[in-house]
Amino acid sequence: MDAAVKDGVDVLSLSLGGPSIPLDKDLIAIGAFGVMSKGILVVCAGGNSGPTPATLSNEAPWILTVGAGSVDRSYRATVRLGDGEAFDGESLTQDKRFSSKAYPLYYPQGTSYCDYFDGVNITGKVVVCDTETPLPPLNSIQAVQAAGGAGVVFINEADFGYTIVVEKYYNLPMSQVTATDGAKIMGYARVGSTAAAHTATILFNSSIVHVKPAPIVAAFSSRGPNAASPGVLKPDIMAPGLNILAAWPSMVPIDGTESYSYNVASGTSMAAPHVTGIVALVKKAHPDWSPSAVKSAIMTTSSTADNAGHPIMDEEHRKASFYSIGAGHVDAAKALDPGLVYDLDVGDYSAYICGLLGEPAMKTITGNSSLTCAAVGSIPEAQLNYPDANAGQLAEGSLRWVSEDHVVRSPIIADARVVPT
């Protein structure tokens, strides 16, 4: 990070992190403070340990912490059953040569993870398989292929809800479906008295765009509350991080075998660079703005609505909490002209650290052993001039400043209590 500053970078993007630890023990937080003091904003991935609460990485308020959401593109692979029902899944294996005829459908109850098929004939059948991971395991694909299966339907793990992660290229026609749809397909495969009642095919429709609703919070995106600093709401922002198509270094093989110039990958590590690019745009438009002003512009102009005009939803299609989306989904165009910005400097953050962790921690993070809390002051988290706030865990709302040209919104999570009078 010091070398990047010496190189003269305008913004620093870090797609890495670990479990929550105190800020004065967090090397990324300490390094980012030094970078911020030089006028450079650090953008970090929020972590991929969702949907479990309090699983964030990179929680310091001087870092722009990014969560991951979906985009309005689907790599559509529809499973059509013999009774006419159809379920939209996804797959990067878009095998247009796969016949649309009805194949026998088989659910191996004893080996539902499809890692072996000893004594079971699946030749020419579409096999339904469970998964314990977000991505279908390669050994299951290979087992179905080796046993002569015609195709495979993978059922997502229940915790991932409507999040379908597609990353790998497989040689076998396949579709990944949600746990809800998978349960219906599985039930259909188990019952019936005729062969026609147990058939299916997979229809490949390439890349479908303008899918609604989008964005949706990706199941894996780490959630607040902020364990390192409970009064500061994190993540700060959400950006595209699910099934992102991007350039890929050809010297890095996929699955340890094949190399590609492009790849599809998922994670907050994909979301953070999107925001980094927007930071660069804002810096270009406002070269004199501080890191906190740039961060404020991005947060206060974000959107909490999806492309259908409804509140952004989480992986279970429930209204997403601020602990998952932060201020909202990033909006590059609006960030260039926010109307109002929250500004903070090294002194403000130093006083905040004194209030949160005390003087020894402040000296460690700032790298200034001669600085004292008596000199910089000490403030509680709630007094930090931050674009969002967390004063509890029960009720969500926002503060809005409205002028003729701008609407500035700051999310708040507050303790919802009735105080007797």
Image (cartoon, rainbow, N blue to C red):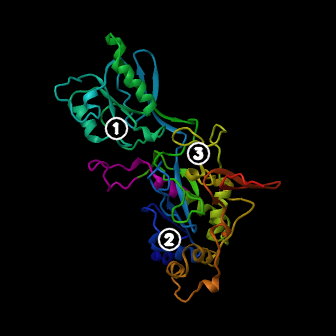
Q: Earlier in the sequence, mark 2 or mark 3?
A: 2
Helix, strand or loop status at disc 1: loop
Residue 23 is tagged as 2
Q: Which residue is mark 1?
A: 131
Magenta extent: 248-274
Residue 320 is tagged as 3
Q: CA gap, disc 1 to disc 2?
A: 37 Å
Q: Nearer the viewer, residue 260 or 226?
A: 226
106 to the left or right of 300: left
- At 63% from the left and 54% from the top, the residue drawn is 327
Image coords of residue 116 (percent x, y):
21, 33
176 to the left or right of 45: left
Quadrant location of the C terminus? Answer: bottom right
Looking at the rendered structure, the kind of residue marked 2 is: Leu
Q: Check if residue 106 falls in the magenta segment.
A: no
Q: Check if residue 250 falls in the magenta segment.
A: yes
Q: Nearer the viewer, residue 248 or 390?
A: 390
Hey, which residue is sitting farthest left in the picture? 119
383 versus 324 height, above or below: below
239 to the left or right of 254: right
Image coords of residue 363 (percent x, y):
52, 82
Helix, strand or loop status at disc 2: helix
Q: Nearer the viewer, residue 83 or 383?
A: 383
Q: How many marks?
A: 3
Hey, which residue is sitting farthest bottom in the picture? 370
338 versus 320 height, above or below: below
Looking at the rendered structure, the kind of residue marked 1 is: Thr
Looking at the rendered structure, the kind of residue marked 3 is: Ala
Q: Nearer the viewer, residue 163 or 382?
A: 382
Hey, which residue is sitting farthest top in the picture? 194
